[in-house]
Amino acid sequence: MRICVFCSSSDAVDPAYLDTAAEAGTLIAQAGHSLVFGGGRVGLMGAVARAVHAGGGKVVGIIPTFMNRPGVPYTECDELIFTSDMRERKARMMAMADAFLVLPGGFGTLEEMTEVITQKQFDFLKVPLVAVNVGGFYDRLVEFFEVFYAERFAKPAYRATCPFVGSPAEAMAYIRGYSPPAPTSKWFT
């Protein structure tokens, strides 16, 4: 299975987040899966990629050409794919993924996660998506999503589209046991 991990490319974060990324990478490799990710060597991206490699797993990085500068790409990737822009990068990552795992990150991570949620909402993707809410990182986002359901901007059934779990081990268990839910009509009637 190719697991696409969305996460931060910042080294300036709490070390607990980097440890979580390394744990996720170790679990991906131990399960015999490959990593598909944004191709960066820094932050959580680098931590997860190094851990997958250390565990003997395959690493596929996908990164826009404008980021091909010294110290940015994880050049040790088994396959490093360059794209023309961020949209192509995300499309390639989504096309290659058999599952999605979201770790803490910033605007790019949020955008990637919500695009997958939307693709699942329209039943274009039938693969697992799970977010690791380490240290309550995503608590406020979960609260905000509840506003969507309460105000009828999204159906409550979509809570299951992206569960938030407490650890990489829980995320991997979710991916392992995933079966697609029955399609739900997006529109309220």
Image: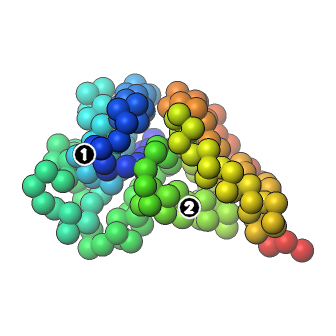
Q: Which quarter of the rendered picture does the C terminus lie within?
A: bottom right
Q: Residue at x 35, y 65 (%)?
A: 89
Residue 96 in view: yes
The tag earlier along the polypeptide, 2 or 1, is 1
Q: Which secondary structure, mark 1? A: loop
Residue farthest toward the left in the current orientation of the protein: 70
- Percent coordinates x, y for residue 108 in the rendering: 42, 60
Which residue is the site of mark 2? 114
Q: Are marks 2 and 1 in contact (CB under 8 Å)?
A: no
> Tag 2: Cα neighbours inside 10 Å, few (<14), some, or many (≥20)?
few
- Percent coordinates x, y for residue 6 in the rendering: 43, 50
- Percent coordinates x, y for residue 97 in the rendering: 45, 52
Residue 176 in view: no
Q: Is residue 99 left or right of residue 8?
A: right
Q: Residue at x 67, y 63 (%)?
A: 121
Q: Which quarter of the rendered picture does the N terminus lie within?
A: top left
Q: Is residue 41 left or right of residue 110?
A: left
Q: Which mark is residue 104?
A: none
Q: Is residue 107 left or right of residue 123?
A: left
Determine which quarter of the picture holds residue 150.
Answer: bottom right
Which residue is the site of mark 1? 42
Q: Residue at x 30, y 31 (%)?
A: 51
- Percent coordinates x, y for residue 86 in the rendering: 34, 69
**Relative to 140, is 116 above or below?**
below
Q: Amino acid at mark 1?
A: Val
> Tag 1: Cα neighbours inside 10 Å, few (<14), some, or many (≥20)?
many
**Relative to 41, is 17 above or below?**
above
Q: Which secondary structure, mark 2? A: helix
